[in-house]
Image: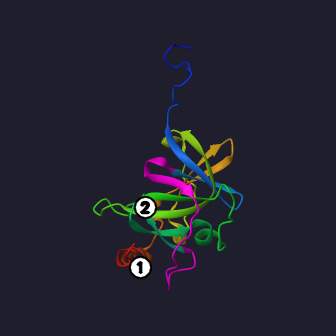
Amino acid sequence: MSETSRSTPGRRSPGQLFLLFSMGTDRYALDVREVIEVMPLRRLKHIPAAPDWVAGLFAFRGKPVPVLDLCAQALGRAATVRTSTRLVVVNYQPQASEPARWLGLILEQASDTLRSPVEAFADAGVSVPNARYLGPVLKAEQGLVQWVRVADLLDVTVRELLFTAAAEVSV
């Protein structure tokens, strides 16, 4: 083994860092470059007439931020409240021509990370129109891990509802 390929203490392994979380018994990953902050759950302000999987709004760094419950969106049931269930603030940017906005995600078992080369993820081979955010998969120690693409979490109607509602709320 050459000196450059030998693992040394304190040296990072190659690849991109991902935040792991669960929905049901399956594992998913978010690119940490999109993550602003991981925090405990907190009280949210309800948004009337929003889809059930829109958990509400909360104030983050002085600004209102809409929050999605990813389990409710994907599985039709609210995330189980436990110590490892987190509120994760991400940069949401559906198109490069638009400014990034903060979006909160309620995620179960969001307490581990995984480092992997992006190229190690493979096409899942399925396309679910109502879940465009489900990306490629990676075979890992935890089983198959699927990449969740933040930019594809919301359709245009919900995006307009959430970010218009957030802009109208004074914090």
Residue at 53%, 46% (x, y): give it.
Answer: 18
Residue 151's tag is 2
- Mark in front: 2 vs 1: 1
Q: Which label sits on residue 7?
A: none
The x and y percentages for residue 16 are 48, 40
The quadrant of the image that shows the N terminus is top right
**Residue 125 at what x, y percent from top left?**
57, 57
Instruction: Report the residue that reaches farthest toward the right.
Output: 25
Which image quadrant: the C terminus?
bottom left
Local packing at callout 1 (Cα closer than 10 Å; few below 14, some 14-19, many 20+) is some
Identify the magenta region.
Answer: 31-54
62 in the magenta segment: no
Q: Is residue 39 magenta?
A: yes
At a point 46% along the width and 60% down the height, the residue shown is 150
The numbered mark, 2 or 1, whose residue comes first in the sequence reads 2
> For the residue marked with disc 2, what is the amino acid?
Ala
Farthest bottom residue in view: 49
**Residue 127, horizontal then vertical, whole percent:** 54, 64
Give the residue displayed 52% in from the left and 71% down from the top: 129
Residue behind mark 1: 161
Q: What residue type is labelled 1?
A: Leu
Residue ID at (69%, 47%): 143
What SS does tag 1 mark?
helix
**Element on which disc 2 rests:** helix
| 118 up-or-down from 7: above or below | below
